[in-house]
Image (spheres, rainbow, N blue to C red):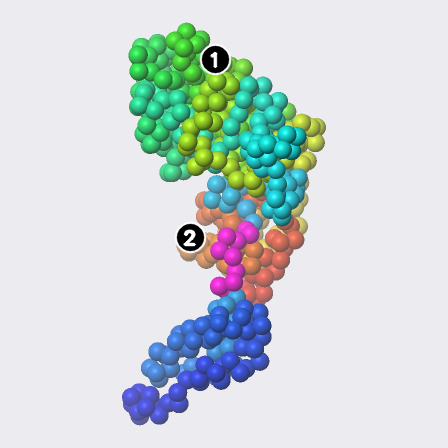
Amino acid sequence: MSNATAVETRPPLPAVDRVLATDAARVLAERFGRAATVASVRASLSEVRPAWLGGASVDISPERIAAAATLRLEAEARPSQRRVLNLTGTVLHTNLGRALLAEEAIAAVTAAMRGPSSLEFDLATGQRGERDDHVRGLLRELTGAEDAVAVNNNAAAVLLTLNSLSEGRESIVSRGELIEIGGSFRMPSIMARAGARLVEVGTTNRTHLADYADAIGPDTALIMKVHPSNYRIEGFVKEVCARELAPLARDHGLPLVDDLGSGVLVDLAAYGLVRERTVQEAVCDGADLVTFSGDKLLGGPQAGLVIGRADLVKRLAKNHLKRALRLDKLRLAALEATLKLYRDPDRLAARLPTLALLTRPPDALKALAGRFAPALARAAGRDYEVAVADTESQIGSGALPLATIPSGGLTVASVDARRAGSALQKLAAALRAVSTPVIGRISDDRLILDLRALDDEAAFAASLDELAATTAAAGAAR
Ligand SMILES: *Cc1c(COP(=O)(O)O)cnc(C)c1O
C-alpha cells in the first residue's frame, strides 16, 4: 500500500477544544492563563501536523498534544537570563555577570525597589538633592579624592571624562596603552565618540617622558594613562608611570587622567593575592582624575566611578551626557552598601563575595572537589573519567591577566581519546542543559570544573543529580 493511500485514510488531528478539555490542559490554563494555553496547544498541533500528514507514526492523542503544550509553555516561562554556576575558574567573568553582590548590597537594592526613596531628595532641607551624594562622601573618604561622580560603567566614565575635558581638543596617550577590552571597548573609538582627538606617543613597547613632553601643544587638553588590563607586553619595555607624568602635566596646567579599569581599594597582597595598584595610590601619584569599574575588583554593581579634583569633577557633573549615563536608584543603593563594607577591612573578605571567592584556599577547594567527584562521575557516565585536580583560576575582567591563583576542581576526560573533542563538547552541553546550568571550560582535552567561584553547593549537587538521572536513563536504553 502506498503512502498516499495511508494519508487519505488518516483521521484528522484532534480539535483544539478536545485538547483543552484534557486534565493537563486545564492545569495549564490555571498556571499560564487561557490565551497562552490555547496558543501553545495550536503551536503543538502545528508542530506534529506535517509528520502526521506525511504518514509518520505519531501519537496525536489529546493528552499527548497537551503534554507537548506543557513543555512548550514551561520553556517559554523560564527566564532568559538564567541562574548559572560559574565553574570557569574566572571569578569576575564578564559574560557571567562579573561581581556577585554582598548580602548588604542585595538588601539595599531590595529596599530601594520596594518603595519611594530619597534618591534625589535632601531629607534635612526638604529640597531637591543629588543622586551621587549617596556615594560621594564614601568615595572621598575611601580614596582620599576631593570629589566623585558615578555613571553607568567605566566605559561611560571614560567617555564622560574625555568629552567634558577634551572635546575638540587633543588627548595624549601612549601607543602601548591603546587597548581593546572584550571587543566592545576600544580606547581610540571611545576617544573618537567623546570628540577628543587622540595624539599617540611612543611605540607599542616603549614610551618615554620626553615623548609626552614633545606632544604637548596649544590644543592639548589632557594626558591620559590607561591600565593595559587584559594584556601585558614583556621584554624590552618602558612605560612612564603616573608619578613621573604628574609633574609634567602640572607644569603645563594639564589634567592627568588615570583609567585604572579595576577599582581596587585595598592592598590585595594583604589577602595573599598579587598586588594591584589601588585607587588611593593613583590619587597619591598625582592623577587628577581616576576612573574605574564598580563590578570588577571593587565587588559591587555595574558602575563607573570618576574620582579626583573637585573643579574637574564639577565639569563632568555639569555635562549633559551625565544625564544619559547616570546610575539608577538600584545600583546606587548597591554601590553605597558595597562601599560601606570597606570601612571595616577586617571583615571585608568575609562579607564581599569577590574577595571571599578570591581568597578561598586551594586545599579546601580540592577537598570540596573530592566530595563532588562521585556525583560528577555518575552524571558524566561510563564514557568519561573524572579526577580531582589542581587547577588555576584567575581574577578576570582584565585584572592581573598573567597572575593565576592556585585553585582546586574536577577534570573530566573522555575514555575514547580519539573522540575527546566532541565527547567533551557533548558533556559540556549536557551540563549547560540542566535546571541550574554548570559552566566549565575545556582545555588540553579536559573539561575543567574549577570550584573557586562555586557559590551554591546545593545547586551544584542538584544539577549533577539531574544530569545523572538523564545519563542513567540513556545508559539503560542502549
Ligand atoms: C574594564 C575596563 C574598562 C571598561 O570598564 P566597564 O566597566 O566594563 O565599562 C575600561 N578601561 C579599562 C582599563 C578597563 O580595564
**Amino acid type for the residue under numbered disc 2:** Gly
Count neighbours of disc 2 (C-alpha within 10 A) and say few if under 14, some if 14 to 19, many if 20 or more. Answer: some
Percent of width and height locating residue 80: 49, 55
Question: Where does residue 231 sit, x and y in percent of width and height?
Answer: 42, 30
Q: Considering the whole magenta stretch, tell me its main secondary structure.
A: loop
Locate residue 236 relative to residue 150 in the image: left or right: left
308 vs 274, nearest the viewer? 308
The answer to which quarter of the image holds residue 253 is: top left
Q: Which quadrant of the view contains residue 364?
A: top right
- Seen from the viewer's position, the closer of residues 439 and 283 is 283
Q: Give the range drawn in magenta.
A: 75-84
Write the residue at 43% across / 76% down. Answer: 42
Q: Do the residues labelled 2 and 1 touch (CB within 8 Å)?
A: no
Q: Which mark is residue 243?
A: 1
Residue 174 belongs to magenta span: no
Q: Which mark is residue 421?
A: 2
Coordinates of residue 301 in the picture (x, y in percent): 55, 38
* Above/below status of 333 relative to 63: above
Whichever of callouts 2 and 1 sits on the residue coming sooner in the sequence is 1
Q: Residue furthest top?
A: 251
Q: Which residue is drawn at 50% across and 59% down?
A: 433
228, above or below 213, in the image: below
- Viewer-proximal residue among 43 and 131: 131
Q: What element carries label 1?
A: helix
Instruction: Kindly identify the residue that appears in the image at 35 percent across and 20 percent down.
Output: 171
